[in-house]
Amino acid sequence: MRDPNDPILIAGAGCAGLSLAVELQQRGYGGKVIIVDPRTEYGRDHTWCHYLTRHHAFESCISHLWNHWRVRTVQGDAVASSTLYPYAQISSERFYAQARSIIEAASGYDLRLGTSVESIEPGSDSVRVRLSDGSVFRVAAVFDSRPAAGTRSASASDVTLLQQFAGLHVKCDCDVFTPDTAEMMDFRLTPGEPVQFMYVLPYSEREALIEATVFTRVPLDRNRLTRMIFEYLDRRCSTHLPEVIHSEYGCIPMTTARIEARPHPRVIRIGLSGGAAKPSTGYAFGAIQSSSAQLAEELSAGISPARVSTPHYRSRRSRFLDDVFLCYLARHPSKAAGIFRGIFQNCSGDRIARFLTDAGTIADDLSIIAAMPKIPFMLEGVRSFRIWSQSAGSDACTGLQQRQSKDARLIRQGGFIPSLR
């Protein structure tokens, strides 16, 4: 029989793992928590952005807010705005610092850096976990955020695109940017196929984070993406090369494949490996915060770790819309610029923000649908029936078999570092 004092273990101390640990502490969870991660130090390795449609524990880490968001195409621009739901940026440095200060000051929390999980052996009443330092723990449950685990069960009909991006935080020697407006997508540099655009978060007239983003089925060379950034800057500002303050790189799977989020009652996948990333956009930060709060609330209320709810990051309705949109995007990449411009031109910023964070109502969804080409998307809905008619996610406890998904293999082969938008 399980000892009621058995700790829980969080595998991976990145965004998802630390978010869950912080929520547990802030909600008064009285059990022991072990957090394990192979890294030995933290730094600025990510930039997380999200529409602030829900409150969360890391709002004090927000470094910039934008109430206006623009999509630019060769046919023209469209701007959407919202004072209620600004677009927020969180630097990983601030996030890590706050999370670690909370965890390290809490009683019963053990953050083990420089150590990785070697094996997870679930049983009927506990889980045996072996770490790389040779230590073995018996725990009540494992919350697994490790991105290397194969978690998707892809069929031949599923669509998988890789959202690959390189980003540079730059400072120019002349006024280039509009500080109050985030450039969500600028398709003017490379219109057509594949889907590729520039994403610009301005901090001042001369300073911004610029990302070259491409949706493809195969990995791309990082240098190609970096060259796109300098070509973009050359067109906007033909002065000296900008000062590069920071660089980052990542890849997010955009897929219709379903997640096996709970391979055992006591092993729950969280974060990207649990399906937090929105399939049609890659946004994940807000979903991670919501699911962490839900898990922490249930555990703090005394619900057994084996009986807490499996995180469901979006409704079946949202999943259906994501599937159809992703299938259409994969089939018609040249239409992407016009579709996004139509949404930002014809829908309110409030509706767009709620829709993109899976916080929308049916009225919000209908508004977004009305801004899209109706007949082509209706046809795509019929074509993709085998995809969107799948169950929303697998909660079946089928053991700890690690199935390698197509997108996970591509990421490893390309040497990508999964990241979050």
Image (spheres, rainbow, N blue to C red):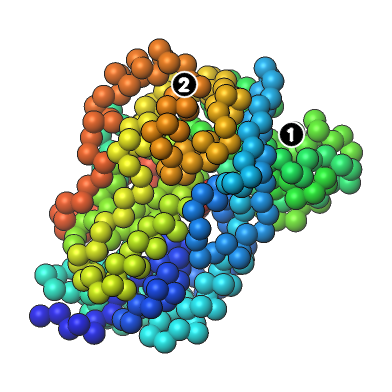
Amino acid on which the number 1 mark rests in the picture: Tyr
Residue, far top: 375
Q: Is residue 294 visible?
A: yes
Q: Which mark is residue 232?
A: 1
Decide which of 78, 204 is in the foreground and name it.
78
Q: Relative to 246, is 393 on the left or the right? A: left
Q: Which residue is drawn at 57% across and 24% down?
A: 346
Q: Which mark is residue 421?
A: none
Q: How many labels does the image show?
A: 2
| Residue 128 found in image quarter | bottom left
Vertical relation: 82 (above or below) 96: above
Q: How crowded is mark 1: few (under 14 residues within 10 Å), some or many (20 or more)?
A: some
Decide which of 372, 214 is in the foreground and name it.
372
Vertical relation: 356 (above or below) 367: below
Q: Which of marks 2 and 1 is in front?
A: 2
Q: Residue at x 47, y 44 (%)?
A: 357
Q: Relative to 132, is 198 on the left or the right? A: right
Q: Which mark is residue 370?
A: 2
Q: Residues within 10 Å of mark 2 (few under 14, many from 20)?
A: some
Secondary structure under tag 2 reads helix
Vertical relation: 91 (above or below) 415: below
Image coordinates for residue 224, horizontal then vertical, percent: 63, 37
Amino acid on which the number 2 mark rests in the picture: Ala
Image coordinates for residue 273, horizontal then vertical, percent: 36, 53
Q: Which residue is drawn at 35% across and 15% down?
A: 379
Image coordinates for residue 337, horizontal then vertical, percent: 58, 24
Image coordinates for residue 362, horizontal then vertical, percent: 38, 33
Secondary structure under tag 1 reads helix
Q: Quadrant of the N terminus?
A: bottom left
